Amino acid sequence: LLAEQACVDALTGAFADDTTTVGHRIELNHVAPVPVGARVQADAVLAAVDGRRLAFRVTVSDDRGLVAAGRVVRVVVERSRFLEKVASGA
């Protein structure tokens, strides 16, 4: 969730109000344990654009360093059309 939110935050202001992105694929490798209760932060960098697909490099860190890294792909969609599909169950 944090990695996806970092991607959404990276796109703030990039699209008109009638456009948004939806999650398509997440590939995340855990590289270190995180103690229960530790604070973590996710960062995302837009790495590639292929038509409507946006590929991000993501990292997740705690105060000791990197704990996860990977890739998130989101797809640009028309918000109202997407919400109609969700409502209809399509």
Image (tube, helix red, strand yellow):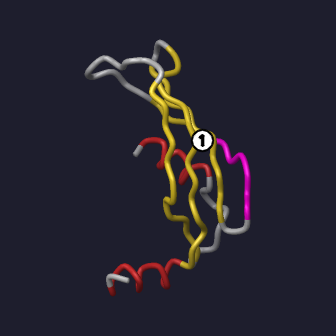
Asked if the magenta segment contains residue 76, the reply would be no
On screen, residue 83 above or below 52: below
Amino acid type of the residue tagged 1 in the rendering:
Ala
On screen, residue 67 above or below 64: below
Q: Which residue is mark 1?
A: 44
Compare residues 32 and 37 and report the one nearer the observer: 32
The residue under the point 60% across, 41% down is 44
On screen, residue 44 above or below 24: above
The residue under the point 57% across, 38% down is 58
Q: Residue furthest left?
A: 36
Compare residues 40 and 86 and report the one nearer the observer: 86
Q: Secondary structure at mark 1?
A: strand
Give the position of the C terminus as an image quadrant: bottom left
Q: Quadrant of residue 43?
A: top right
Q: Residues within 10 Å of mark 1 (few under 14, many from 20)?
A: many
Q: Residue 32: image x %, image y %?
A: 44, 18
Q: Is residue 57 left or right of residue 4?
A: right
Q: Residue 33: image x %, image y %?
A: 37, 18
Q: Is residue 66 left or right of residue 14?
A: left
The residue under the point 36% across, 20% down is 34
Disc tally is 1
Q: What's the magenta region?
A: 44-50
Q: Quadrant of residue 77?
A: bottom right
Q: Residue 85: image x %, image y %?
A: 41, 83
Compare residues 28 and 86 and report the one nearer the observer: 28
On screen, residue 19 above or below 30: below
Q: Residue furthest top?
A: 64
The residue under the point 52% across, 21% down is 66
Secondary structure character of the magenta stretch overall: strand
Q: Residue 14: image x %, image y %?
A: 67, 62
